[in-house]
Amino acid sequence: MPLITYREAIRHALAEELERDKNVVVLGEEVAQFHGAYKVTEGLLEKFGPKRIVDTPISEAGFIGMGVGASMLGIRPVMELMFWSFYSVAFDQILNNAANVRYMSGGLINCPIVIRGPANGGTNVGATHSHTPENVLANHPGVKVVVPSTPYDAKGLLKSAIRDNDPVFFLENTILYGDKGEVPTDEYLIPLGLADVKRVGTDLTIVTYGRCVLHSLAAAEQLQKEHNISVEVVDLRSIRPLDIDTVLASVAKTHRVLIVEEQKPFSSVGSQLAFMIQKEAFDELDGPIHRLSTVDAPAIYSPPVEFEQLPNPQRVIKAALEALA
Amino acid sequence: MPSPVNKKPSATAVAQAADSAPCASPALSAPINQQLTKADKIALFTTMMRIRRFEERSLRAYQAKKIGGFLHLYIGQEAVAVGCCSLMGKNDHVITAYRDHGHAIAVGMGLNEQMAELYGKATGCSKGKGGSMHFFAPDRNFWGGHGIVGGQIPLGTGLAYALKYKGLKGAAMAFMGDGAVNQGAVHEAYNLASLWQLPVIFVIENNGYSMGTSQERSSAGDLGKRAAGYDMAWASCDGHDVYDVRATMDKFLQLAREESKPAVVEIRTYRYRGHSVADPDNTYRPKAEIEEYRKTKDPIQVFQQALVAEGVLSDALIESIDQSARAESEAAAEFAEASPFPTPDDIQKDVYWEADHPTERKSQGRLFFD
């Protein structure tokens, strides 16, 4: 099976869906001529032309709202946010219009948009460029939120997202773009709302998603070698819809939970997970649910310190040992 | 609704207009108005009257506590929605803000479903889920009904983008009030429309007040003229004269449909009631100003006088149209009153297309949470 990068996986998904459905349009800043700020859309302009791959001016509220409006008439825009941090510039369009027009019209309209782009810290770009808003987005009924951790997941999920008739927000990671993974050449789709057990284990369930999956897997290796602890890593892949059943099945097996998330703690994705797990699997738990989040402050710039602000394998190991204490 | 087919005006119609109406609107002579038949004109007048009576009946329902939340009445602005929407072809689309009952009626939505929506009933046009600010009728090319000032303008630009993408000869009319013109999203939309030459007409229904703030206290410069800064065509016309609204808009609609050119059209109008029913309307404008407009520029009165002079309306016919409009609105209130509310089980329907189409759902997992 070919080994391709996370960014190539996304690009292939875009190309396949552009080919398949002529209503799919890719819009965003620098996506066409510049080949994409992170080279995700490289080559698409040459292949599909300027009508399908569209460079927008810097006006998130304008072009995302425009995409929402166009989707009401059957266009399927896949709009890039150069950083998901810029979502707040278009908050009203994303979380009032895209999320609500179906409801407010009593179901007369649907809004088949995709907004994709990187949502992550860890690159020293400072507090305004390092947001991970999956919790904020997922708080809004009407939207779907997906955070893939591998090239295989990214491609299958993005194809599903583009075909989905509801608004889907697809959160990538600049640090993952260069990661390589096996991706089949034959077409495949991964449904939204299906978690993936990335590592089978017996002593501790780590529930996580995105880049923290990789931190958790690295930590799990070391925990096995040095502490003989068998960790199960559950990759949510999809925040909303949420596959809580896979999580609960794991909890029923290990009876200990550590949530690892690149999220500021208050009202994070993990907050919601913890409530659900203790509510629905209380008797399965041998101890409180633990959580490793981003240190609760705006993203610091200083490179070595930012590394300590975010979850990393050493911090995961420490948190796992605490969860099992 | 009058058809936009270009017909040569009959000699008799022109002569009648010239002889008996010394104050006839100059806009009457525009081809788009010359081609209106007597029945077309009566239909325009009737729609304006139906809007007026519906709004008055809604106000009474609100005061009787049948309607909750906001109610932004269109009384005084009838000629704008009726004039603009009467020009719609099959590929033209409309979107507006929260003062949307006039547009809803002008595109042909029923009064029953609108009043039921105001009452929050399951028979409402949005199943009781939207309320006054969120009337929609996709089958009539009407895309709402939006609550956030200016938020609908990028959406309207998107309608135009879709038309152009699909190669359809049509235009989007994106309405806003004078209060919306300073929102950032509106400027972003202007730029996109002009940069990409999208067939959208940004219609500014300038009733002089953004809630309690007059135009001169909120906006620098001429509202329509801002379009020139984005290299867009623009115009300003009188919204109390439905002929003028039609004549002005027709020109820009044709440019949008034929040449995919955007434009900004400011239509000067006036509202008699407050911003919404919660506005006591005693802090920001003199009563005399409202009375002056009502006496000299009421759009229904103005059109009525014109049509009487043209020999299209008689006192008897006017009375009959008025009584019908009142009766229709009353019947709508009765329909709303008798209709059931949605149930708590309905709260989580119409959120996700997938959840509403379970046999076609591809995703798994939980879409809703407790």
Image: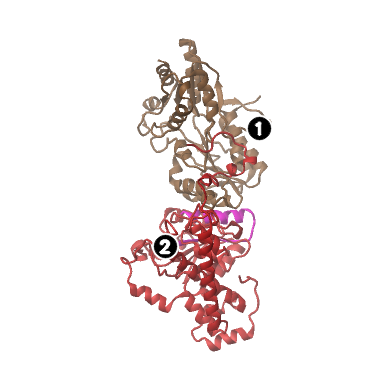
Chain colours: A brown, B red
Query: What residue would you read off at disc 1?
Result: A188
Dot 1 falls on which chain? A
* Mark 1, secondary structure of its residue: loop
- Residues in magenta, as a range: B151-178
> Residue placed at 49% from the left, 70% from the top?
B53
Instruction: Please tell me whether mark 2 or mark 1 is closer to you in this view.
Output: 2
Residue B95 visible in the snapshot = no
Residue A229 visible in the snapshot = yes
- Image coordinates of residue A211 in percent, x first then y, are 49, 27
Dot 2 falls on which chain? B
Mark 1 surroundings: few (<14), some (14-19) or many (≥20) residues within 10 A: some
- The residue furthest bottom is B19
* Mark 2, secondary structure of its residue: loop
In reply to whether residue B167 is colored magenta, the answer given is: yes
Disc 2 to disc 1, C-alpha distance = 58 Å
Q: Is residue A72 above or below residue A189?
A: below
- Image coordinates of residue B282 in percent, x first then y, are 32, 67
